[in-house]
Amino acid sequence: MNPEFRRQLWLQFSATRLIVLPMLVLACFAAASLSQPNDLPQTLALTGAALFGLLVWGMGTLAAGASVIDEITEHTWDQQRMSALQPWAMTWGKLAGATSYGWYGGLICLLVAVPGALLQGRGNTVLWFVVAGVLGGVLLQALLIAVNLQLAKAGGRITRGGGVAALVLVLLWGVVPLISAFNNEQATWWGQTFGRLNFMVASLALFAGCALVAAWRSMAEVLAVRQWPWGWPALACVITAYLAGFSPDHRLAVFSVTGLMVSSVFTYAALLTEPQLRPMWQRVATRLGSSQWRAGLQQLPRWPTTLALALPFALLAVVSMPPESGPPLRVLGSPVGFLSVAWVMLMARDCALALFLAFSPTGRRPLRSFLVLILVLYGLLPWLLRSFDSTLLLGLVQPLMMGGVLSLAFAALHLMLALGLLRWRWQTTAPA
């Protein structure tokens, strides 16, 4: 048996807990039945569903996150990292073991709720709802483990609230398109029509699989097991394909713009959460300079992968965006397409500026400095220059305010200046 799974079972279960949880669950069913005796099957089904969500989605998810946080706060995480367990064994051991008590209670709820739903004549849908509940639990639990592992990798003060808050933000960002797709009985995705419940279960299965992969790869990063950097851009591609499939028309253009937006979010998220240390980049540069491509790529942070992914999406937007003007622009691409390429250049500029600040030998808070710089570049300077009523001057500071080729030229100028600053900082801080 997996040692981590066995250890978590010992932590979660005792004779007292084995007896107390079923008694509490049955007491809740009894109270609900006495309060609504007229429609007992429906009462049992709804109460069981609510308790399942509370135990599996709530308590089980918090327990999954605590399996990482408790190791850090109790100073036993270093012992975990020194164990001989592989990343996947450690991942599923924590995921299945730490949440086992919640699943134990959830199983008891299903044993009562499912017969109640069947007595209501819902035999065609009850199985799908059970599968959806199980997949939703796996999704939440694996996702919180992945988030907490990333917080542990980033360092600093780790709290339960931080991981839960990040989990809520991720869910709020991704659940809106999913809910909007279920306003009708049918869901249309990439021109194909699916039943609402079937599509929901398939979506949950997809993202539960993504969450499991994210937890596994995050565990590998924390355990210092080198991997090829395919996970982050692959997740961006999956989310892009999923969201773009809801578009009723212009699917290629929507796919390219969605991919650019998702890649941008992923790039900045990784840039802001990963420490950009000079020694780490020195190792990457040394490996790549000596043609050790595999070692260099395996030490590469995540944000360059989605930054590189954004460029094909931007170029695809140039050729797929519906033309807004005459034949010349139709040949070269629409102005919106040009802006997408300019945006990729500005993202590269921002990444270079972030490294410029991170490599400073005197800078103590490079993240705060970078956020202030971004506010100045994207907010304060354009706001001040609007008073001069000069489109050219405004476009020179903020190339996205221009259109066509000028936006590309000004964005390229920004990128060259940022790369020049980064090259100067790299040379001046090189070890003797």
Image (cartoon, helix red, strand yellow):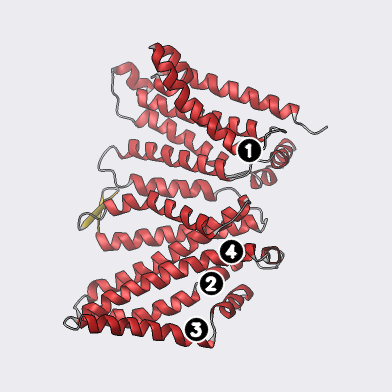
How far apart in space, not on screen, are marks 1 and 4 (Cα)? 27 Å
**Element type at marker 1?**
loop
Residue 164 point in image, percent of width and height: 48, 58
In which quadrant of the rendered view does residue 103 lie?
bottom left
Relative to 269, 280 lies left or right: right
- Determine crowd level at label 1: few under 14, some 14-19, many 20+ residues with C-alpha closer than 10 A: few
Q: Earlier in the sequence, mark 1 or mark 2?
A: 2
Q: Which disc number belongs to residue 54?
A: none
Instruction: State the residue position of label 3.
Output: 17
How far apart in space, not on screen, are marks 3 and 1 (Cα)? 47 Å
Residue 132 higher or lower than 307, as above or below: below
What amino acid does circle 1 point to? Arg
Instruction: State the residue position of label 1.
Output: 365
What amino acid does circle 3 point to? Arg
What amino acid does circle 2 point to? Ala
Q: Earlier in the sequence, mark 3 or mark 4?
A: 3
**Quick check: marks 1 and 4 in contact, CB under 8 Å?**
no
